[in-house]
Image (tube, grey):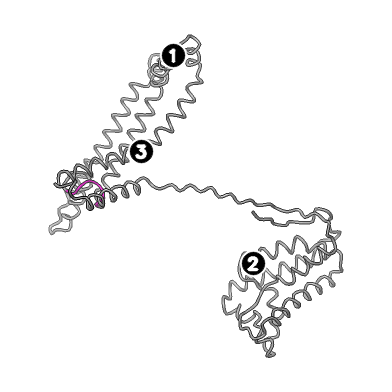
Amino acid sequence: MGVIPLSDASRRPYRYPVVTAWIIGVNVAVFVLELIGGEAFVTKWSLVPADIVAGRHLATILTSMFMHGGFSHIIGNMVFLWAFGPEIEDLMTRRGYLAFYLLGGLAATAAQVGADPASTVPNLGASGAIAAVMGAFIVTYPHDRIRSLLVIFVFVRMAYIPAVLLIAAAILTLQAYMALHPDLFDTAAVRADARLLFLCAILGVTSWTSLCRLLRGETLKLREAEYVQAARAYGAGSMTIMLRHLLPNVMHIVLITVALDFSGLVLAEAVLSYVGVGVDPTTISWGTMINSARLEMAREPMVWWSLAAAFTFMFTLVLAANLFADVVRDALDPRLANNRKAA
């Protein structure tokens, strides 16, 4: 949780805070010069206590009060200065306020040099001057209310892991288990069957959630439909309503989702088998076919038709599945059937 002061809610300045705005502008301009000049600029104009004690670089006593170490440093200082400075500027004359600001910065600089006069660490920042302004505000207006922004940080983070990564991790876990328990998988055929079965299981586990979410939303919408309410009013049971009214109206979603997921699962199997974490290399699959074709393309002369055949048949399979699902959806969707009868 954090509190960011914005302004004094108990009073308003009679004059525009020209000096406060000018000080903020100078600080921002110097910070831009820091970004442009880099470390060399900061080293040249920041205050080093040992140099001040030795009588060198005395100008840095003033220049260091307008320098900052980063974006958070300057933003924080300028926000506090704009929140408390206008009232103090309005209380004093503008020249008096500027002199007070500079004297506060000089006092903070003297304290830094006096605390460690032999230090060679550069010092910079307007925090001392702004602290003087805040102190004057608290002493002068101790009962004023400050309009502030209350920031409450509530971090609720959910990490979404791509299903392919989960599948690959599961297959690698199975391979490690096989390596640690060779007595349970004594033949190559048993190992190949186990990897194929486990791949099918993990693909199913990671692909049902989207369909379930869609079906739940559609079912919640359909249960409020007039024909469902009428069936319930006539005394139809829950199972009858589900089988006669809900299931036919959600089957098109099932078919479309299954067709889309089928394409994704074919691609996932091909990618996983291609990189060696899918089915066993001795099992015929799209991934192993593409991997073998890749090796053959390195031959001279190049054998390209194996790879082209694998991609062509994968494309044909996915296209056929989508066309079949589209035809079945048109046949089973009751809304499309009603439209054909009306026509």
x and y percentages locating residue 316 in the rendered image: 24, 38
Image-quadrant location for residue 24: bottom right
Q: What amino acid is at disc 2?
A: His
Label located before the other in sequence (1 or 2): 2
Determine whether the residue tagged by mark 1 lies in a helix, strand or loop. Answer: loop
Q: Main secondary structure of the magenta part?
A: loop
**Residue 101 covered by magenta stretch:** no
Camera-side residue: 117 or 291? 117
Q: Residue at x 83, y 53 (%)?
A: 10
Q: Residue at x 26, y 42 (%)?
A: 198
Count all numbered tags in the image, as a single digit: 3
Residue at which label 1 appears: 237
Q: What amino acid is at disc 1?
A: Gly
Farthest top residue in view: 234
Which-is-in-front pick, marks 1 and 3?
A: 1
Q: Residue at x 31, y 40 (%)?
A: 203
Q: Which residues are magenta?
A: 276-281
Label located before the other in sequence (1 or 3): 3
x and y percentages locating residue 12 in the rendered image: 83, 56
Residue at which label 2 appears: 73
x and y percentages locating residue 47 in the rendered image: 66, 81
167 horizontally vs 295: left or right: right
